[in-house]
Image: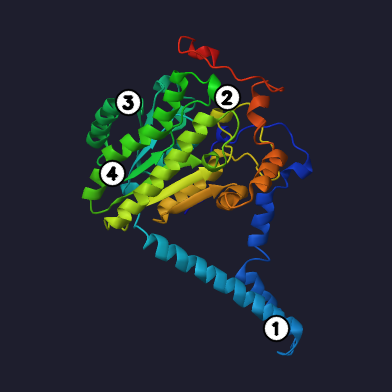
Amino acid sequence: MEKITPSRRYLTPRPAQKWYEHITLDLIFKVLSQTFLHPFVAWIIVLCLRAQVTPTDHPAWRIAVGYAVLLTLLMAVSIFDRRIAYGLPREVEPSHEVIVITGGGSGLGQVIAQIYGMRGASVAVLDIKEVSEVEGWDELSGVEYYKCDVGDRKALEMTAKKIENDLGKPTVLINCAAASVNGVPLLSLTPEAMKKTIQTNLLAPFHLLQIFLPAMLDTNVGGVIVNVSSVLGHLTAAGLSDYSVSKAGLSTMHKSLEVELRASGHDDKIKTLLVETGQLSTPLFDGIETPNRFFAPVIEPIQVAYEIVSAIDNGQSGVIRLPAFAKMVDWYAVLPASIQRLARYLSGIDTAVAKAYDRHTPQPMQVVSETESESDV
């Protein structure tokens, strides 16, 4: 895949950080994976010892060879595991793909749209905003804009027909749309706010799959389904109950789709990607400071876009989790409850939202009546 160079507006300006604030768990893992934990480097050490005519019965030789063999086996097992789990990759030619991106008017969706637009793919962006309200839209080339509320089934069906008439049958569906974060306790959520979150984050992907997937199954080239969820679907956080529930549902729906495609024998034709990230540097989480920059750094949209586009180009199914701590969430559930509680306290995950909304001291939760306006939330 060619190098992706985003326009500067996709690199979110941030206050100057001290040098040590750039050192994160992700950086440490990346350095280790490219050095001491890479088989190539391990075998270089073996060759260096051989060049020094180190005896084969010397402890240093045995340790170096054993370490190199171990890393090589782990890499081979990883490749074998992926092949068994997800099958052969799908052949991809970007210029022949018709890509539908929901929520492509800003954030991650817009970055992906820009990348594919520059590469000559046919791209359809669905967003609830008017095209005149989309910042930087004039910079995008080769991208068609369709104003559509993805939570409205009838509007989606009409838009799908327009896309097929204008660009052809979609081969890639990327669900990036997400409702605004309410950031209030569960009992303070209005029914309207809850409904909007569930409708956009969970029901819309259901509708989109039912509308676009049949056409992908009918074609010889198949397709790719990408669902952008969140690590909060596993961890949850105080003040984000509706968002966390919707993302947990989306992740579960994705897994259901995956097993149904496998059971029907279509998993070789339709590839699926589940993306579960930590906090992204997008308007969705403006004002919310990450509780721990070392373990949970804020991710730029271009980083996630690169991983998604690379996986699609390679024709792969799988799960993409960023940053590094997101790869460990499956292990969190098996920890003793006391350790889980301690981890939450130390991470500050349950106070981040309250601080962002200037609720520095705990307040008693109050039920908001249906008659109160949404602006009061």
Q: CA distance from mark 4 to mark 2?
A: 36 Å
Q: Earlier in the sequence, mark 3 or mark 4?
A: 3
Label disc, if present, on residue 74 of the rendered structure: none
Residue type beneath disc 4:
Leu
Q: CA distance from mark 3 to mark 2?
A: 27 Å
Label 2 CA crowd tier, 10 Å (few <14, some 14–19, many 20+): many
Q: CA distance from mark 3 to mark 4?
A: 18 Å
Q: Earlier in the sequence, mark 4 or mark 2?
A: 2
Residue ID at (39%, 41%): 174
Secondary structure at badge 4 equals helix
Which quadrant of the figure contains the C terminus? top right
Residue type beneath disc 2:
Pro
- The residue that mark 4 highlights is 213
Q: CA distance from mark 1 to mark 4?
A: 54 Å
Secondary structure at badge 3 equals loop
Q: Nearer the viewer, mark 3 or mark 2?
A: 2
Label 4 CA crowd tier, 10 Å (few <14, some 14–19, many 20+): many
Task: Classify 338 as above or below 350.
Answer: below
Q: What x and y, as percent, mark residue 43?
A: 64, 76
With 374 as the anchor, is 260 left or right in this view?
A: left
Q: CA distance from mark 1 to mark 3?
A: 64 Å
The count of marks equals 4
The answer to whether residue 66 is visible is yes
Residue type beneath disc 3:
Asp
- The residue that mark 1 highlights is 62
- The residue that mark 2 highlights is 185
Label disc, if present, on residue 152 of the rendered structure: 3
Label 1 CA crowd tier, 10 Å (few <14, some 14–19, many 20+): some
- Circles 1 and 4: CB atoms closer than 8 Å: no
Q: What x and y, as percent, mark residue 16?
A: 74, 34
With 123 as the anchor, is 327 left or right in this view?
A: right
